[in-house]
Image: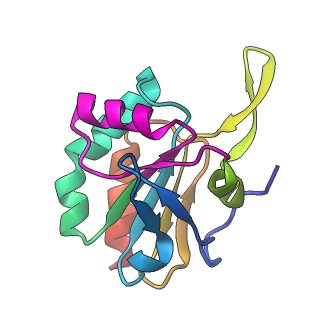
Amino acid sequence: MADWIEAGTKAPAFTLPNADGNKVKLSDLKGQPVVVYFYPKDDTPGCTKEACAFRDRYGELTDLGVQLLGVSGDTAESHQDFRDKYDLPFPLLVDKDHKMSEKYGAYREKNMYGKKSMGIQRSTFLIDADGKVAKVWKRVRVDGHDDQVIEAVKALA
């Protein structure tokens, strides 16, 4: 299990397919801020609430020049269904083998009701235009998280 990456470090490179099978590379996004949020599972209550909160604020994020990316271990088909069901306007990336989640420290041991398992910990990373991690939110609580992210993006400017 990898440690969390920390603010001030270079963001780990990644190339992952989105829900439509198109490759998304971090290096292609250099020059603009990127918000990468990791979530456990498509179409579950907390993940849906988080995705819809980002959807509802997506215009503000794009006005700030941000590229928003959601990442989970779900399949492209699952992402397509989730995206279409909730009209999500941002890419959902497929991290089936958890390689990206591990690089960022988001794939870790979780403990729910005394049962331990490995999985994606809800977390968000703000990467600045130079490719450095500007802010990390570990173990995200969904309520108000969209506000926290937007405030942090504004503080970058």
| In magenta stretch: residue 94 | yes
How many numbered markers are drawn? Answer: 0
Nearer-the-camera pick, 99 or 131: 99
Q: Give residue 64's position: percent from left, percent from top.
A: 24, 69
Type of colouring: rainbow
Q: In the rendered image, which quarter is residue 116 located in?
A: top right
Q: Give residue 100's position: percent from left, percent from top.
A: 63, 57
The residue stretch that appears in magenta: 70-97
Q: In the rendered image, which quarter is residue 11 located in?
A: bottom right
Q: Residue furthest front?
A: 21
Is residue 143 in view? no
Is residue 84 in view? yes
In the rendered view, tell whether residue 81 sits above or below residue 8: above
In the rendered view, tell whether residue 54 sits above or below residue 77: below
Q: Give residue 49's position: percent from left, percent from top.
A: 36, 30
- Residue beneath the point at 62% across and 78% down: 10
In the rendered view, tell whether residue 26 sits above or below residue 139: below
Q: In the rendered image, which quarter is residue 136 located in?
A: bottom right
Where is the C terminus found, in terms of image quarters?
Answer: bottom left
In the picture, measured across the screen, residue 51 lies left or right of residue 38, that is left
Q: Give residue 12's position: percent from left, percent from top.
A: 63, 71
- Residue beneath the point at 35% across and 78% down: 32
Nearer-the-camera pick, 48 or 13: 13
- Residue beneath the point at 52% across and 59% down: 16
In the rendered view, tell whether residue 60 sits above or below residue 13: above
| In magenta stretch: residue 52 | no
In the picture, measured across the screen, residue 114 lies left or right of residue 43, that is right
- Residue beneath the point at 52% across and 31% down: 41
Q: Residue furthest top?
A: 113
